[in-house]
Amino acid sequence: MNGQVISLPDGRRLGYCMVGKGKPVVYFHGTASSRLEVLLLKDFAETANLRIIGVDRPGYGLSSYKTRKNLVDFGGDVNFLADSLGLERFGVLGWSGGGVFALAYLNSYPEHITNAVIAATPNLPFDISQAHNTPFARYIIKIPFIADFAMKNMSRQILKANNDINKFLKSRAGKQMLHAYSKEDLKFFSDPTWLTLLYRSMAEAFRQGNQGIKAVTEEHQIFMKPWNLDFPKILADKLFIWQGSDDKTCRVNNAYLISQKMVSAHLEVFQGKGHCVMFDNLNKLGALLFRD
């Protein structure tokens, strides 16, 4: 359940985790998370007859670190895994920062995709000043060498939370974290099972220590650059963009900006919902991903 590893042609390791049985869906996890994010979708996958495959990006979890300077490099790793699993066509699902890499994959390899859903995804260049509602996101991430220091502190907080989630929520850092989410999101954060799985996935992002920290920092640096994708290549009619109107982590304007680049994409803004909008609409998500 925790994951498996395959060897890539260049000798790197690639970690992945699968839940459910049925139609395959490749899952692009959030930034500062990991393949274990699919454990949040285990019951959903089984009910919806989906096989959801979460893949660690380089430096996260079980996947070997590799410097990334653009959005598209990871697509080759995904293709090698798909070939290894015998997948010719599959759905794509991306949450938060993972939605950016899901879009990059859809742009590069549209022939593999049956349909795609991205939820709470930042537009690039991402306006860090609006993210998470914290000083860290507003200022520190803009300066790489300070960002590494701040990310180390963030990883320590996540590891503490993973060790004792109830104690963390009562701490100053825990209360600050809760402040950064909408009222609707807090329903999920009040569920100890859901929250434990989320922080387990986030802690796994830093399994490799400094390599994981570098991977997270590099992704933020990529997110602050403009898109380097040829958007007309995306089969936008296969793409569903979901966004919560009250998302504090990735503001609603991001979804509108992404949809402007792909006029035939299906944009849906869920009123009153937050960053966890995907988990709030699982029945609808299952119907979209299951269709061919």
Image (cartoon, rainbow, N blue to C red):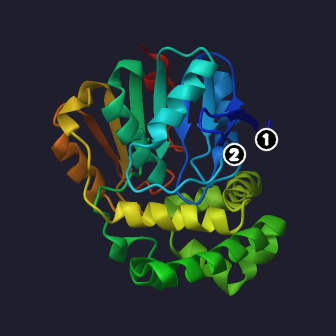
Q: Dot 2: few (<14), some (14–19), or many (≥20) neighbours within 10 Å?
A: many
Q: Reading the chain from its start, which is encountered first: label 1 or label 2?
A: 1
What is the residue that sits farthest to the front in this orientation? 10
Residue at 42% x, 45% y: name it.
101
Q: How many marks?
A: 2
Residue at 62% x, 31% y: name it.
53
Could one spot residue 282 in this view of the protein? no
Asked whether 27 or 45 is in front, the reply is: 27
Q: Dot 1: few (<14), some (14–19), or many (≥20) neighbours within 10 Å?
A: few
* In the image, residue 277 above or below residue 155: above
Residue at 55% x, 47% y: name it.
29
Residue type at numbered disc 2? Leu
* In the image, residue 79 above or below residue 70: above
**Quarter of the image that includes the C terminus:** top left
Q: Is residue 78 left or right of residue 273?
A: right
Residue 119, image x and y in percent? Answer: 42, 45
Circle 1 residue: 2
Q: CA distance from mark 1 to mark 2?
A: 7 Å
Asked whether 157 or 86 is in front, the reply is: 86
Asked whether 50 or 190 is in front, the reply is: 50
Instruction: For mark 2, give the secondary structure.
Output: helix
Residue at 36% x, 40% y: name it.
103
Residue 36's disc number: 2
